Amino acid sequence: MDTYFVSLFVIGFLLLLVTLGSGWISRLPLSYALIYLLVGIGLGEYGVQLINLRPDAKFLERITEFVVIVSVFSCGLKMKRPLKLWAWNITARLIGFLMPISIFAIAAAGHWILGFGWGPAILLGAILAPTDPVLASEVQMAHMEDKDELRFGLTSEGGLNDALAFPFVYFGLHALKDNNWDNWLKQWVAIDLIWAIAAGIVMGIVVSKAVVWVDKQLQKYRPVDNLMEDFIALSTILLTYTLTEFVNGYGFLAVFVAGVVFQKTYHDPEKSLSQLEFTERIEKLMEVATILLLGSLLRFQPMITYAGDSLIIGVLVLLVIRPLGAWLSTLGGYWQPKTRWLFGWFGIRGVGSLYYLAYAFSHGLKDQTGERLAWITYTTIVISVIIHGISSTPLMNWYHDKVEPTQPSIVESSK
């Protein structure tokens, strides 16, 4: 049986199933990602064996890359707060403190507990530290008018941390190829850290503003067809990402910035909402394909072989490093203890980590080290999808009913 047609049938049937059943699914302690993962496993080697794909690293890199850039743009569109430091306080803490804490803590565990060299250990930290904007969008992400700190913080973190983990992916890859850090450290700081971040920010602003300006000028003479207008968002994503990559900037960062600038520049809430709905539909469709693929990739023997390594890192990342790091990162703030612990709990890993792993394989990661990193990453994502998929709905309902009404607003805290 042709795998291509089987895959299309499965995706079509699954989309129909989850769409028609969404009213019931949303009330259950289940995420859509968990459903997709279980279906992917059932269709793979240990189920009915309808899907038996072993994609190479480049294919996995490209499919996960696309779904992440769409997702981070969607995150940017939801950011309606003023561009003031007080309004983005929680984001600065989660990115500026929690991200490096997570990377270095995971790297330390990889080096001192699992025996990795510092290169692979830091690479592992960069792969697993970012929370995932794709899978997180269905469990705790904000809407455009949402002023709640928990959802805003997690959404903005999901949009930014995939971009800002990239310098440490490069750091780990450099260290894999050359143990003498003096040979490349200055170049890493200048190019991979300073230039790439600055270029991402600038390109995100410039490209999105240029697209909006051109659109507004043309609208004066002849409006865009309503059926085609939503493609402006997709074109902005692709232009921003590619042009930023052309100048060696971080495309994920640029696309998030473009999303923020895009919705602030139009001054038309209906237009921004339409673009958001369009990008979210693309994101959800790609999520189905990606998580089904992950489920079909899982293999019993290597997961058992690396189970010890995987459980050590998975438990540390999800139950120790993230919660404690979030608690430390929010010290001195106005958030209630319950809210601070929820920041720590909602650290779902997913498509972003798959992308960084595939990118590393395409740029020098290989052999047994690569095999160990891959199965640690896969297992950690599976654990995260399960525990966050089961816990997110009841926890967010509890937060909405009991905690959110008593949480001070950002306006009150800034006075």
Image (spheres, rainbow, N blue to C red):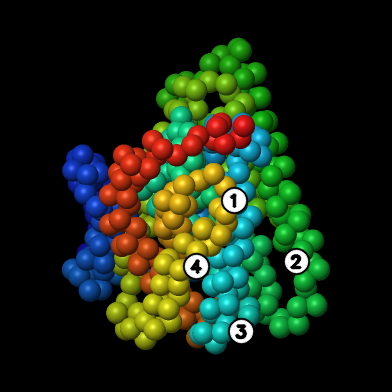
The residue located at (71%, 54%) in the rendering is: 196
Estimate the spatial distance between the alpha carbons at disc 1 and disc 4, rounded to whole Å: 19 Å
Q: Are there few (<14), some (14-19), or many (20+) residues within 10 Å of tag 3?
A: some
Q: Earlier in the sequence, mark 4 or mark 2?
A: 2
Residue 342 left/right relative to 194: left
Q: Secondary structure at mark 2?
A: helix
Residue at image mark 4: 321
- Give the label, 1 or 4, closer to the camera: 1
**Amino acid type indicated by mark 1:** Gly
N-term-proximal mark, 1 vs 3: 3
Q: Are marks 1 and 3 in contact (CB under 8 Å)?
A: no
- Please indicate, yes or no, whether residue 36 appears anywhere in the rendered image: no
**Mark 3 falls on what kind of element?**
loop
Q: Which residue is mark 3?
A: 117
- Would you name the residue on which mark 2 appears? 188
Disc 2 marks a residue whose amino acid type is Trp
Identified at 45% across, 75% down, the residue is 313
First reached walking from the N terminus: tag 2 or tag 1: 2
Q: Position of residue 96 (x, y in %)?
A: 64, 55
Q: Residues within 10 Å of mark 1 (few under 14, many from 20)?
A: few
Q: Nearer the viewer, mark 4 or mark 3?
A: 4
Q: Earlier in the sequence, mark 4 or mark 3?
A: 3
